Amino acid sequence: MSVTGTVTGNEGAGATLSASFQVGGCAALAFKPKFSASTQGKTSKANGASLHVKLTPPHEGPQSTTPANASGTGSTSGSASGSNAQAEESNIARVKVDLPKQLPSRLTTLQKACLAKVFEANPAGCPPASAVGHATVHTPLLPVPLEGPAYFVSHGNEAFPQLILVLQGYGITIDLVGDTFISKAGITSSTFAHVPDAPVSSFELTLPQGKYSALTANANLCTVKGGLKMPTEFVGQNGAVIHQSTPISVSGCPKAKTAAQLRAAKLAAALKACHKKPKGAKRSGCERTAHKRYGPIKRKKR
């Protein structure tokens, strides 16, 4: 890395100066980002499935601080004045996630991706169906968050559309590009290979349900054995690499029935079957058996 400048004398003569420097100690920086994910248990063919992810440093500090000067130019050294924890953390360089097979991409939505030439001219001109989510980033370098829509963008030479997050705020626009890949097994991967080298207090991305949801579900998300898992890779600006299996919490699932409720349900089903028998001894015997098997358990008196 180097710093360059120009020196101009009183008589107009100038000279270009350059000084090289190296940043030391990066490898010793900690790198332990916290990453969580959640989805809704209730899905449908019409509205697909949802996904919400959140990324924070190990010790979440203030979400914003006053920038270095009024023009909005702040330090990008990775030191967050509002959070000592962040000053000791390496920033993120790359993120890759593999969605569980129960949460595949919705192909009908991928087919409605915005054309690259339309997006490059003005993302606002993209068709509504290509806007599949919303992202928000807080950084201590700015007094306001960067936020904006997430688009599927199609390039003619790529097999699958990119997921591009258009982040705006404080006169700044950043397009955070995620490359999409779908394996033969139907597993979707998203790779954000070029994350800006800047401290982040929090990052959140929501892909909601809807007519043009990014994701769908091919199973009951509430009953997946072992729960939903999302293999995740983080690479720090200092070269540190973390691999983890991120659990996806599922909300809105019906509560598991108690033992008494299960017995009551079995009793009701058994009695319904008994009522199909002709009245008389057979039906009465069937009902007695049902009550004996599935009736309330009487506790013994002490």
Image (spheres, helix red, strand yellow):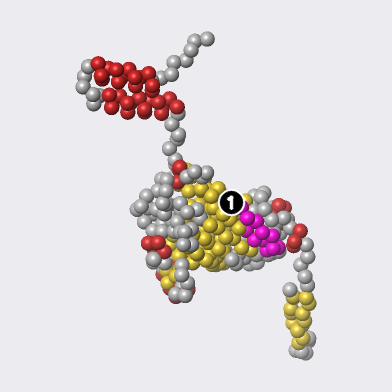
Most frequent secondary structure within the magenta stretch: strand
Residue 2 location, quadrant = bottom right
Looking at the image, is 113 positioned above or below residue 208? below
Identify the residue at the far top of this view: 302
Looking at the image, is 179 positioned above or below residue 54? below
Q: Is residue 143 visible?
A: no
Looking at the image, is 78 positioned above or below residue 269? below
Q: What is the total number of numbered labels drawn onto the structure image?
A: 1
What is the secondary structure assignment of the residue under circle 1? strand
Q: Give yes or no for residue 72 being in the magenta stretch.
A: no
Q: Residue at x 29, y 17 (%)?
A: 285
Label 1: how many residues lie within 10 Å, few (<14), some (14-19) or many (20+)? few
Position of 277 compared to 289: left or right?
Answer: left
Q: Residue at x 30, y 20 (%)?
A: 286
Q: Residue at x 74, y 82 (%)?
A: 6
Position of 146 compared to 235: left or right?
Answer: left
Residue 282 location, quadrant = top left
| Residue bearing the label numbered 1 | 245
x, y percent for residue 37: 53, 50
Q: 53 and 267: which one is in front?
A: 267
x, y percent for residue 104: 45, 56
x, y percent for residue 128: 39, 63
- Assign the N terminus to one quadrant of the image: bottom right
Q: Give yes or no for residue 239 being in the magenta stretch.
A: yes
Q: Which residues are magenta?
A: 234-245
Identify the residue at the far front of this view: 282
Identify the residue at the far left of this view: 278
Q: Is residue 18 visible?
A: yes
Q: Residue at x 57, y 50 (%)?
A: 246
x, y percent for residue 28: 76, 58
User: Hey, what amino acid is under mark 1?
Assistant: Ser
